[in-house]
């Protein structure tokens, strides 16, 4: 769940700027590898076995987090692909100190069916002995004896700090071991340096330098599942619920959960309420009960919540205030370690996999003077960050918290916490703007939202964000129901804040949507209706149809002056095929639904004799959903339209599956196919080939997921991203209106005022539809450049062990040219 953009400019001297780097296993989409056993990046070729002789140790330390197993799986399999030995160091630093059976050689099979599992398969423990030099001396001896000179630490800032200290002391520790005759002097040469890479695994998201840590998204799933279920009983009895959420002294989880659940109040340590929090809470609850007509109040409290004086705020304190002062029926729920439990979300599986892979590449790139680095997330990009700079900034947050310098704490936390605070406070404090109290509202500028395209989770959240921003700034929000047809039928209504309650979590489109574009309905008729309803600006939420409609309205400006208004597109489609957008609303929910289905199919297959499932996913002509879901579910292969494949490729995958099931001990296989991957080589065709050619090693079954992928309830990412997208698109629209509203009239014929909300490195911007159209394939409704195609080879590296017969045959050739 990346931060998704800035509302504010970062103040000077509050951010550490780190070197960005393309992941070395991820080639440009135009430089697809053609050799079956290598992956090409922009400046190097990584060949199977090229790092043979090196030894990697991987361990998890501190609190566990969902997604750790995905990272461990990637480290083991990518390491083995490169020819390395990879050792599990069990029970964290404790296992490193004790050695023997706690440091074991990893095998390919040991990571099978682990990508979805929560917790950590290699154990985690806190070790007091490692904090002392004698303990680190024991650990060094154990590592040297096995030839381990590369370590990947997965944990929080404390674990990563310990790893860096160990690296700094390494030469001295080895010299002491030689002097005491515990190792031979030749080890000083063969093990002269220790390379360290850190992965941040923590549900708290309290590490500076990364937008998200491994485990946070899964924890948000557990929190919102619980809050959603609490909501039904709370509404039934007009009760208030106070929910305590983990996160130590970081308020990220309760803040994002508060936005995503439409909570009434959130108490977090970074931004305590001003003045008397007890009186402020009561005043807010009274006001929201009147204005929103709410039947229930949900208050989220971080376990480290404090007031402006540094005094702790507990759930019991909140309960007592509401009970005694407002005579409310208040219940307390402490979620506790439920947040750490359960399966990893699709997001955590993917970032765990990508970060684990990049960690191995970072070790490969390390030289004598290379500082220890942490693998971090910047938007959707994986970057390397100087480890100790990030650790020092993280510790600085604690110092500023102790000084009660909350403004500096928020700055140090970074753009993500600031953006979420802005959005939550905006929604919490919605009151009608003074302009709405005037007898006449005719002079208020009217901004309309319409949904266009297939329904997707996050559309309703975007509508809520839009309404909140409009009302708070004194503009009149309008909903156009039933898409463009609804506009022609005058289904245009003003919206009050109370009408968008419970929109955030709801799937589908409450406004109603259609796949017909503006041109198909009639641009001239749309222009007439825009004039009739006095619409000053338009926000279109949807997929490629929304983008196409905006482009058609832009071209229609030449003939219809009514279309010379600001227009923005918020991408929302499970196909993820809107030009300029790297991750559309709805994709995360769909991917989680696909992963859940695949997990259940694999579980079913494991109970049978060896079985391979062929699963058809949605996505129209775009293979994003199939490819990323295959990566997240641990699939063996994926067939998509962007990568041309033939009958021979299908047969090669089938042959490889036969060998894998026969020699590796795996009992099931999983192959995903995009619904429009190939007109003739259908899902049923692939199933029949597998079922016939797989004999006697396996039988095949097929499943078409269909519209179940769209989802009933939005995921945490789609809820929060939807709200933020609605706010940002409206903020851009209001700014643009201020530039083109003169003399009581709105007019703009600049192409730059018809835009798509795009995202680059975690920062949202607005790109002209006219420019994006030049990079768009209107035949297949796809952008010409798609970032995720870089991941195609990674799927196969992670899926096929090298030591089974005909391993190369599974890597069917992905040519630089394709059917597109």
Image (cartoon, rainbow, N blue to C red):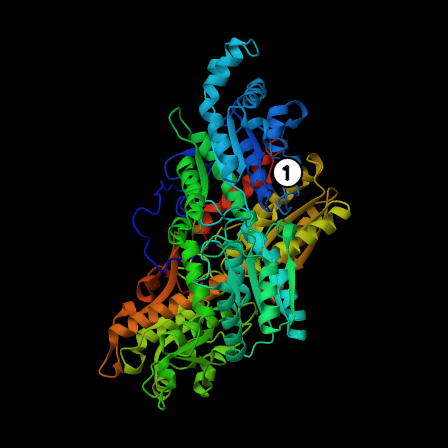
Is label 1 in a helix, a strand or a loop? helix
- Going by the image, does 527 lie left or right of 146? left
Q: Is residue 23 above or below residue 450?
A: above
Q: Residue drawn 28% across and 69% down?
A: 751
Q: Is residue 416 above or below residue 540?
A: above
Mark 1 — residue?
111
Compare residues 471 and 31 and report the one nearer the observer: 471
Compare residues 157 and 123 and report the one nearer the observer: 157
Quick one: quadrant of the C terminus?
A: bottom left
Q: Residue drawn 44% across and 43% down?
A: 394
- Quadrant of residue 668 within the rendered picture: top right
Compare residues 363 and 424 and report the one nearer the observer: 424
Residue farthest toward the left in the current orientation of the protein = 743
- Going by the image, does 347 lie left or right of 527? right
Compare residues 237 and 625 and report the one nearer the observer: 237
Residue 22 visible in the current orientation: yes
Rendered location of residue 529, percent (x, y): 38, 86
Rendered location of residue 356, percent (x, y): 52, 39
Rendered location of residue 728, percent (x, y): 39, 65
Q: Is residue 262 above or below residue 58?
A: below
């Amino acid at each position: 769940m990346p931060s998704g953009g800035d509302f504010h400019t970062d103040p000077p001297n509050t951010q550490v700027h780190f070197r960005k780097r393309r992941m070395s296993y991820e080639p440009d989409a135009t430089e697809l590898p053609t050799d079956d056993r290598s992956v090409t990046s922009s400046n190097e070729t990584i060949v199977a076995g090229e790092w043979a002789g090196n030894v990697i140790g991987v361990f998890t330390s501190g609190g566990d987090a969902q997604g750790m197993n995905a990272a461990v799986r990637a480290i083991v399999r990518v390491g083995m692909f490169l020819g390395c030995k990879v050792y599990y160091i069990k029970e964290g630093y404790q296992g490193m100190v004790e050695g023997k059976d706690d440091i074991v050689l990893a095998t390919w099979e040991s990571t099978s069916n682990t990508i979805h599992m929560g917790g950590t398969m290699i154990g985690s423990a806190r070790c007091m002995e490692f904090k002392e030099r004698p303990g680190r001396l024991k650990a060094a001896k154990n590592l040297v004896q096995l030839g381990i000179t590369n370590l990947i630490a997965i944990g929080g800032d404390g674990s990563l700090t310990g790893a860096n200290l160990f690296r700094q002391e390494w030469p001295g520790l080895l010299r002491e071991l030689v002097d005491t005759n515990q190792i031979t002097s030749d080890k000083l040469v063969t093990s002269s340096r220790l390379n360290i890479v850190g992965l941040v695994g923590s549900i708290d998201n309290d590490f500076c330098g990364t937008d998200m840590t491994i485990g946070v998204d899964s924890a948000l799933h557990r929190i919102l599942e619980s809050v959603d279920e609490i909501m039904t009983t709370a509404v039934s009895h007009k009760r208030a619920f106070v929910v305590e959420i983990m996160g130590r002294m970081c308020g990220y989880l309760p803040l994002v959960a508060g936005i995503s659940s439409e909570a009434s109040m959130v108490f977090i340590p970074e931004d305590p309420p001003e003045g008397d929090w007890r009186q402020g809470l009561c005043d807010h609850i009274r006001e929201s009960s009147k204005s929103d007509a709410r039947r229930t109040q949900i208050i989220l409290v971080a376990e480290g919540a404090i007031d402006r004086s540094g005094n702790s705020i507990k759930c019991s304190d909140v309960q007592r205030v509401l009970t005694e002062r407002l005579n409310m029926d208040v219940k307390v729920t402490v979620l506790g370690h439920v947040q750490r439990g359960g399966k990893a979300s699709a997001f955590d599986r993917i970032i765990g996999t990508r970060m684990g892979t990049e960690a191995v590449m970072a070790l490969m790139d390390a030289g004598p003077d290379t500082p220890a680095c942490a693998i971090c997330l910047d938007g959707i990009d994986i970057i390397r960050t100087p480890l100790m700079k990030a650790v020092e900034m993280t510790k600085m947050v604690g110092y500023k918290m102790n000084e009660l310098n909350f403004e500096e704490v928020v700055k140090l936390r970074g753009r993500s916490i600031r953006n979420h605070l802005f959005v939550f406070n905006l929604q919490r404090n919605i009151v009608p703007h003074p302009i709405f109290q005037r007898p006449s509202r005719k002079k208020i500028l009217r901004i309309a939202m319409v949904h266009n395209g297939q329904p997707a989770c996050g559309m309703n959240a975007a509508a809520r964000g839009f309404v909140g921003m409009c009302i708070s700034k004194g503009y009149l929000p309008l909903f156009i129901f039933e898409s463009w047809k609804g506009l022609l039928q005058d289904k245009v209504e003003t919206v009050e804040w109370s009408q968008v309650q419970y929109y955030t979590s709801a799937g589908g489109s409450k406004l109603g949507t259609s796949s017909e574009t503006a041109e198909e309905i009639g641009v001239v008729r749309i222009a007439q209706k825009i004039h009739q309803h006095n619409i000053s600006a338009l926000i279109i939420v949807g997929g490629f149809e929304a983008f196409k409609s905006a482009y058609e309205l832009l071209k229609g400006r030449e003939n219809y002056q009514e279309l010379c208004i600001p227009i923005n597109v918020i991408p929302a489609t499970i196909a993820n095929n809107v030009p300029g957008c790297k991750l559309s609303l709805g994709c995360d929910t769909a991917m989680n639904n696909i992963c859940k289905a695949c997990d259940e199919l694999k579980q079913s297959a494991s109970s049978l004799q060896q079985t391979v499932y062929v699963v058809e996913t949605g996505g129209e002509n775009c293979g994003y959903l199939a490819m990323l879901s295959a990566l997240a579910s641990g699939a063996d292969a994926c067939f998509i339209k962007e990568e041309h494949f033939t009958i021979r490729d299908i047969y090669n995958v089938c042959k490889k599956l036969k060998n894998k099931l026969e020699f590796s001990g795996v009992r099931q296989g999983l192959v995903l196919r995009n619904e429009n991957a190939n007109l003739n080589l259908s899902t049923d065709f692939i199933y029949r080939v597998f079922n016939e050619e797989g004999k006697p090693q396996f039988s095949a079954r097929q499943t078409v997921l269909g519209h179940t992928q769209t989802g009933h309830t939005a995921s945490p990412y789609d809820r929060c991203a939807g709200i933020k997208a609605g706010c940002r698109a409206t903020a851009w629209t209001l700014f643009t209106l201020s530039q083109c509203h003169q003399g009581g009239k709105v007019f703009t014929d600049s192409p730059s005022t018809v835009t798509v909300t795009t995202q680059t490195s975690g920062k949202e911007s607005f790109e002209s539809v006219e420019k994006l159209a030049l990079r768009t394939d209107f035949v297949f409704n796809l952008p010409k450049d798609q970032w995720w195609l870089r991941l195609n080879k990674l799927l196969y590296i992670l899926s096929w062990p090298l030591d089974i017969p005909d391993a190369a045959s599974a890597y069917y050739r992905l040519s630089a040219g394709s059917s597109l």
